Image (cartoon, rainbow, N blue to C red):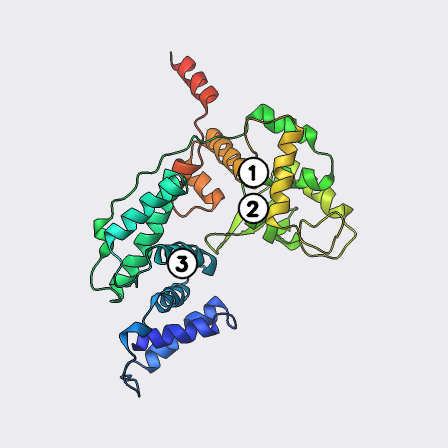
Amino acid sequence: MTKTEIINDIIYDMSHELTTEQLDRLKITMLVKMQDFEITEMTTLPALDVYNNDWLLKRFLIDGIAKGTKESTIKQYLGAVKLLFEATGKNYRQITGQDITDYLAMRQYRDKISSNYKSTLNRYFFSFFQWAYRKNHLPEDIMKDVDRIKIVQKKKERLTDEEVEDIREACQTLREKALLELMLSTGMRVGEIVALDISDVDLARKRVNIYGEKTSQYRTGMLTTKAVKALRAYIDSRTDDNKALFVKDNNLHTRLCKNSIQIIAKSLAVRAGITRISATVHVYRKTFASVQYRKSKNILYVSKLLGHANSNATVQYYLVDDIEDMQHMFDVAN
């Protein structure tokens, strides 16, 4: 085991006890203090068969956490690779690019997975096996023999302005109104909404402090006047001392979970008579993005509001082609 691997193991063991900043400081301190030392194992190296698939999966987990990748993200990769190992019945040193190609084809034929999901699995395998090659766990880059899979871009859909107004009229409780206006005003992810505390909402300055679910960084969301009024009415109606912004109606001491918020978001649209689309929180997020771009024509501005590090993601996945807006512009130009 190398010096870096030992340090990463220690960082992993302490990851549940220390903050990210403390882990970074610990790692830097260990690297500095140990830079002039060589480390050798006191016993002979174990037999080659000790380095099995489980060992490699653990190493990927440890290195990922040491790098700062979210553990939930790492486990998505590990789950996919573990299924690959089980299907082939091979040790990781024996896996070939053809094995991966055959596995993906089998999953598409047997399990009827979509081309997009097959592309996602392929991306997981690229990350995992190229990491293993860079770390010298594999003698060669087996992914060079695996072709990239083209993603079929799904049609992006959002709620129309009329549908948004219908949903507003369908709201029956102060909590529903507050949630709806927050989604329309900020375009937050469902996990970000779940994590919100009352203290994160600054009604006086019409802002909300959002902890990015994917970026692990804070950003500022802007609140419309409608959102401020709806949130104030909901918060003022609360009689509990729970710090969470959204809580259960029948248990004010329990924060709403992702599934509960998704159910509310979808049911509002159904109640408004909207059946052409399943109005998940993500659909409200796309609606927010498209409306903001239509008003501003500033993609960087919209990207920052959404919490995207790259505006390309905003264009590719969030901006819905607004046919009505395009028709208006075409008519004016002609």
Residue that carries the numbered disc 3 in the rendered image: 78
Q: Answer yes or no: do the residues labelled 3 and 2 have beta carbons within 8 Å?
A: no
Q: Is residue 136 visible to us here?
A: yes
Image depth: mark 3 or mark 2 in front: 3
**Amino acid beneath label 3:** Leu
Mark 1: few/some/many CA within 10 Å (<14, 14-19, 20+): some
- From the image, which quarter does the N terminus lie in? bottom left
Please give left or right for residue 249 compared with residue 35 in the image.
right
Residue that carries the numbered disc 1 in the rendered image: 280
Residue in the picture at 32% in, 49% down: 103
Decide which of 9, 230 is in the foreground and name it: 9
- From the image, which quarter does the C terminus lie in? top left
SS for callout 1: loop
The alpha-carbon separation of the residues under discs 1 and 3 comes to 27 Å
Q: Considering only order in the chain, which callout, 1 or 2, is on the residue closer to the N terminus?
A: 2
Q: Considering only order in the chain, which callout, 2 or 3, is on the residue closer to the N terminus?
A: 3
Q: Answer yes or no: do the residues labelled 2 and 1 have beta carbons within 8 Å?
A: yes
Mark 3: few/some/many CA within 10 Å (<14, 14-19, 20+): many
| Residue furthest bottom in the image | 42
Residue 129 x, y percent position in the rendering: 29, 58
SS for callout 2: helix
The alpha-carbon separation of the residues under discs 3 and 2 comes to 24 Å
Residue in the picture at 72% in, 56% down: 242
The alpha-carbon separation of the residues under discs 2 and 1 comes to 9 Å
